[in-house]
Image: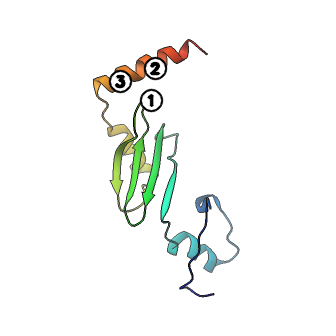
């Protein structure tokens, strides 16, 4: 098995692994490995209700999932966003009056059932 071998990892969550066994394996999976599809929750402490998405060969997207409707992309770039970039994108995101109103109504209604 060599470097020209196709390797498919499903739900690998490589960012959660602390020990790859060897330095070469660590380098392979953290620096050289190219994810072709990625969809997960963004860091919720800095970008609540947001998702990170990438579909190779495209770039990375940070999107906010509103209470109603499709996710709204708030950041697109070639590299995976850092924590600081997620914070900046979330804080600079603009919500329209209708979107704010709908989310307020839904929050109020859901509060009735708590």
Pointer 2 with pointer 1, Cβ within 8 A: yes
Location of residue 22 by image quarter = bottom right
For marks 2 and 3 on the same chain, the one whose residue lies earlier in the sequence: 3
Q: What residue sits 34% from the left and 44% below the top?
A: 74
Residue 91's x, y, as percent?
36, 38
Give the CA separation, mark 2 to mark 3. Answer: 10 Å
Q: Where is residue 82 in the image (x, y as percent from the top left)?
A: 44, 54
Relative to 33, residue 85 above or below: above
Which element carries disc 2, helix, strand or loop?
helix
Residue linked to disc 2: 106
Left or right: 84 as drawn, with respect to 40: left
Q: Mark 3 points at which residue?
A: 100
Residue annotated with mark 1: 67
Q: Where is residue 88 in the image (x, y as percent from the top left)?
A: 36, 44
* Rendered location of residue 19, percent (x, y): 69, 67
Q: Which residue is at 42% across, 65% downward?
A: 56
């Amino acid at each position: 098995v060599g470097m020209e071998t196709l390797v498919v990892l499903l739900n690998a969550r490589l960012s959660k692994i602390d020990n790859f066994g060897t330095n070469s394996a660590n380098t392979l999976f953290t620096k050289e490995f190219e994810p072709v599809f990625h969809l997960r929750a963004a860091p919720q402490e800095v970008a609540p209700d947001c998702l990170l998405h990438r579909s190779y060969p495209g770039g990375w997207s940070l999107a906010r999932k509103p209470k109603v409707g499709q996710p709204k992309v708030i950041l697109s770039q070639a590299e995976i966003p850092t924590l600081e970039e997620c914070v900046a994108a979330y804080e600079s995101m603009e919500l329209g009056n209708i979107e704010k109103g709908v989310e307020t109504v839904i929050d109020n209604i859901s509060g009735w059932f708590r």
